[in-house]
Image (cartoon, rainbow, N blue to C red):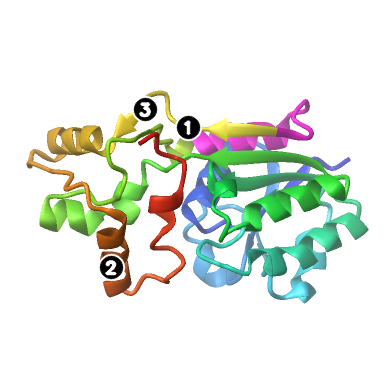
Amino acid sequence: MTNKILVTGATGTIGKAVIKSLKAKQASFVAGVREKETAKDKLYGADLVKFDFSDASTFEEATTDIDRVFLLGPPLVLNLVELLTPFIDFLKRKKIMKVVYLSALGLEHVKELPFHSILEKKLSDEGFDFTILKLSFFAQNFKTYDWENITQRNITYAPAGKGKVGFVDVSDVGEVAATVLTSEGHARKTYVLKGPELLSYFDAANILSDVTGKKIIYPNPGGEEYTGALKAAGVPDFVAPLYDQCVFFDR
């Protein structure tokens, strides 16, 4: 065994956190990226290899000497099953069976978006030595998706009601993924990753107020209002209703 890891989705928020943790553990890995030249300054000096889920010609070189894979599909892709299946089939043919798959907590209850459930079942049915990481909402979402609301409108915006969620920090996700990838005992297990404290968006607004020194409020929009706001901003139609359907919140 080479104990060498391929990290897919390497240039994203989670991928970069995984790479940072792998480097701290002095693990042997390569980062799969679509454009090596544009990615080299983003990835902490990691070894890069060209990789694209939609281009099967990149699979062989990307998996040279690899025996385990961090599998992270691109976000906001409805045809994720069709996109990832050829690579999963390739891994099986090449007998690379250790896969750590990044999933989402609660999405299995959203009937319109079954892709994670389908892919998790495929890894199980095909005999992979898989580990599933089911993630709660990211603390980083307040910056990634809510930054303009917070900094320009003094609000944080989601149809969560009084429900609470354990926001998880992406650095913790990276540490868990790196640990699973570099140690044994995690085969065919599912780990739920969430923060240590359940917080409502009202709680989050108070914390943001303390941090920013400005009064941040949570207007508690309804699902229809939220969907309309996202659609007006150009967000894909299938994304807008997710908050209103998901079970991440105990409302």
Residue 194 is marked as 1
Contact (CB < 8 A) between labels 1 and 2?
Answer: no
Q: Residues within 10 Å of mark 2 (few under 14, many from 20)?
A: some
Relative to residue 238, is residue 68 drawn left or right?
right
User: Looking at the image, is 232 positioned above or below residue 248?
Assistant: below
C-alpha distance separating marks 3 and 1: 9 Å
Q: Residues within 10 Å of mark 1 (few under 14, many from 20)?
A: many
- Can the viewer see residue 97? no
Residue 64 placed where, x, y %?
Answer: 82, 58
Which amino acid, mark 1? Lys
For label 3, the crowd category at 10 Å Cα-Cα, with few meaning under 14, some 14 to 19 and many 20 or more, is some
User: What is the quadrant of the C terminus in the image?
Assistant: top left
Q: What residue is at 64 percent from the left and 58 percent from the top?
A: 115
Q: Magenta residues, as a range? A: 172-189
Q: Amino acid at mark 2?
A: Gly
Which of 14 and 1 lies nearest the eye of the viewer?
14
